[in-house]
């Protein structure tokens, strides 16, 4: 069974940093690109970032470019998102997602909530 | 950036009826790189359709996708109680991999 479990969400003040983690199991992690997708409470889905299986290519939404960094550790079947200079508009559930065929998502975690507020 | 527009915003349907959801792209989505997801309250999204018309593993055949270019459709042939949810389209042709704003299907 494929499992993706996010952690690291918290209440943080604007301008601070946070690191999210996603531990996976049930599939060969280093065969797949991985993504982060977020959803503000009561709102729609927003793609955030992606990393190829070997970390050779990383992509970011304009809204987070220069502030967020995606990374992965294939030895630990884990995906990360380092979030710096957080803003109130970054408040959302952050989902880790496994990609097929490039960038559609066949498996999702249950999300971790990041709240940015003073 | 490819902007996706979904219509209607809310669709009120009776169980057993047919639902037709639309997704329109601001520019051509090449190779039909268009997916559909279902999201129930408190749950992560679930992949239904990829490549415009291919059903994901385990998805009932009452769900079907069609379309190409800039116009795509998700059809639910006979609504079951568990189908009342929000549906999102997503293009994965060009980064950023954008989602539509969603269509909520609720009980009439």
Image (spheres, coloured by chain):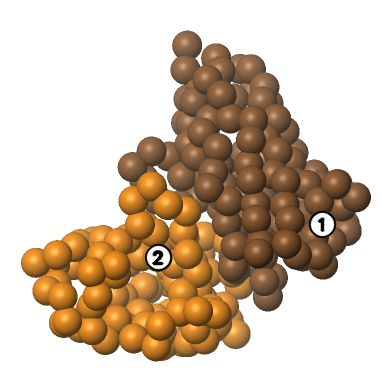
Chain colours: A brown, B orange
Residue A11, image x, y percentages:
52, 20
Seen at 59% across and 68% down, the residue is A106
Which residue is identified by label 2? B38
Residue A93, image x, y percentages:
50, 39
User: Which part of the image, by quadrant, shows the N terminus of chain A?
Assistant: bottom right
Q: Disc 2: which chain?
A: B
Query: Distance from label 1 to label 2 (Cα)?
Result: 29 Å
* Viewer-closest of A45 and B41: B41
* Viewer-closest of A86 and A12: A12
**Left of A84 or right of it: where is A92?**
left
Residue B25, image x, y percentages:
43, 72
Seen at 17% across and 81% down, the residue is B16
Q: Quadrant of residue A31?
A: bottom right
**Left of B103 or right of it: where is A103?**
right
* Viewer-closest of B49 and B21: B49
Q: Is residue A83 visible?
A: no
User: Taking B78 as reference, is A97 above or below it?
Assistant: above
- Residues tagged by mark 1 and mark 2 found on one chain of the structure: no
Q: Residue furthest top?
A: A118
Q: Residue furthest left?
A: B108
Task: Count residues near mark 1 (Cα–Cα under 10 Å), then give few for <14, some for 14-19, many for 20+.
Answer: few
Which residue is identified by label 1? A57
Task: Count residues near mark 2 (Cα–Cα under 10 Å), then give few for <14, some for 14-19, many for 20+.
Answer: many
Seen at 78% across and 47% down, the residue is A78
User: Taking B85 as reference, is A80 above or below it?
Assistant: above
Residue A49, image x, y percentages:
66, 49
**Left of B78 or right of it: where is A21?**
right
SS class, disc 1: loop
């Amino acid at each position: 069974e494929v499992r993706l479990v996010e952690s690291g969400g918290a209440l943080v003040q604007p301008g601070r940093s946070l690191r999210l983690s996603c531990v996976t199991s049930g599939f060969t992690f280093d065969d797949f690109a991985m993504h982060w997708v977020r959803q503000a409470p009561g709102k729609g889905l927003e793609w955030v970032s992606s990393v190829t299986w070997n970390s050779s290519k990383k992509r970011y939404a304009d809204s987070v470019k220069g502030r967020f960094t995606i990374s992965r550790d294939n030895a630990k079947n884990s995906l990360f998102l380092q979030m710096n200079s957080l803003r109130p508009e970054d408040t959302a559930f952050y989902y880790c997602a496994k990609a097929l065929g490039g960038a559609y998502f066949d498996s999702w975690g249950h999300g971790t909530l990041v709240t940015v507020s003073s | 950036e490819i902007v996706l527009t979904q219509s209607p915003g809310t669709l009120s349907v009776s169980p057993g009826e047919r639902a037709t959801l639309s997704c329109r792209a601001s520019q051509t989505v090449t190779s039909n790189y268009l997916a559909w997801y279902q999201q129930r309250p408190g749950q992560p999204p679930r992949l239904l359709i990829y490549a415009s018309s291919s059903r994901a593993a385990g998805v009932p055949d009452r769900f079907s996708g069609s379309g190409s270019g800039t116009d795509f459709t998700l059809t639910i042939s006979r609504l079951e109680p568990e189908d009342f949810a929000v549906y999102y389209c997503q293009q994965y042709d060009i980064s950023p991999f954008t989602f539509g704003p969603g269509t909520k299907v609720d009980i009439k």
